[in-house]
Image: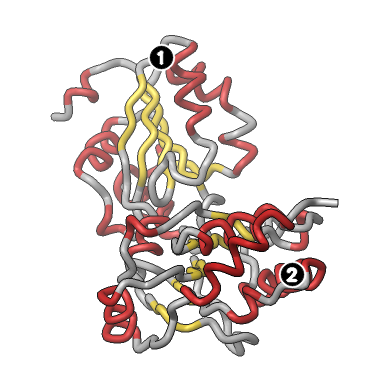
Amino acid sequence: MNKNCAKPSWLALAGGGLRPGHFTQDLIALAKCAHTILVDTYTMPGSAWLYEALRKLAGDRVRPARRSDLEGGIERIVSEALERRVLVVVPGDPLIATTHRALLEEAKRAEAQTILVPGISGVCAAKTVTGLDYYKYGRVVTLPGPWRMVKPYSVLEYIYGNLCLGLHTLVLLDIDPSTGQQLDPCRGLQDLLVLEQELRSGILGKASKILVERAQHSGERVSRLVCPLGRPLREPASIVIPGRLARYEAEALSVLHNIDDADNAGLQRVACKLLDTISEP
């Protein structure tokens, strides 16, 4: 029996990984003894499997949770965790690219017992499945959808900054809150190309771009991004913009994914020059 199951109350935040086979023994043990299990249904598209898998494991103690339930109901969740065992399960890793850390912070302030169980991260999977060197990635950015009604100057700035340093960029695709679907990568890139016209730059138009779909899921695919896509996007998906490729990275792309000539080193100097010209009006 897991030692935490002997405790009367706690708040546990656990990562469910990217598919049922990614459940850790710690997660399974906590799920078997938690009084209440809340499952994040909004952070990652295509994660309906997580709720179904936990229902098979823990029955009617499992409840789906929307953004408003978790982020807007922190006080209620923490209050329950002072008296009962509450498990919150998130697809991927619970503290990567999410706001779930606020749950742990509030629980600590309330002096509730807290438990953190890491999971296999979708961000890490998207980086590594390409075969590119994990340590040569720069800042991760999220490409906002038109529903945000913003111009993504900062996204362009961080991409240029990574290219200037010869680093790769992982570009996450925003999720439409009304449909739960991810931003079409070509639509998102088009918005960036429009901003580049204002700067009289054509870096992204020239840069090699890689589309990563369903990393570590069934139907995984890594391919050169060519717009228009011409087919439904396989969610979850993201874009990788390579920087300066080492020989072993170029070979990995070629052998693993049949992607050649993806090196963007030729854009490095131009990206450095244009970096200081990016500013929001």
- Quadrant holding the N terminus: top left
Residue 239 position (above or below residue 98): below
Where in the figure is residue 116, as x and y percent of width and height?
A: 33, 31
Residue 19 position (above or below residue 213): above
Nearest to the observer: residue 276 or residue 162: 276
- Judge whether residue 175 can be spotted in this image: no
Hey, what amino acid is under mark 1? Ala
Nearest to the observer: residue 257 or residue 116: 257
The residue that appears at 69% across and 54% down in the rendered structure is 276
Instruction: Say which residue label 1 marks.
Output: 112
Asked which secondary structure carries label 1, the reply is loop
Instruction: Say which residue label 2 marks.
Output: 196
The residue that appears at 59% across and 44% down in the rendered structure is 66
Asked which secondary structure carries label 2, the reply is helix
Question: Is 191 on the left-hand or right-hand side of 223?
Answer: right
* Label drawn at residue 205: none
Task: Of the two numbered discs 1 and 2 on the same chain, state the one appearing first in sequence.
Answer: 1
Hey, what amino acid is under mark 2? Glu
Q: CA distance from mark 1 to mark 2?
A: 49 Å
How many circles with numbers are drawn on the protein?
A: 2
- Judge whether residue 41 can be spotted in this image: yes
Mark 1 closeness class: few <14, some 14–19, many ≥20 residues within 10 Å: some
Nearest to the observer: residue 123 or residue 41: 123
The residue that appears at 46% across and 38% down in the rendered structure is 38
Residue 212 position (above or below residue 63): below
Residue 110 position (above or below residue 255): above
The residue that appears at 44% across and 81% down in the rendered structure is 262
Question: Is 274 on the left-hand or right-hand side of 99?
Answer: right
Residue 94: name its quadrant.
Answer: top left
Where in the figure is residue 144, as x and y percent of width and height?
A: 68, 58
Q: How is the image coloured?
A: secondary structure
Nearest to the observer: residue 58 or residue 115: 115
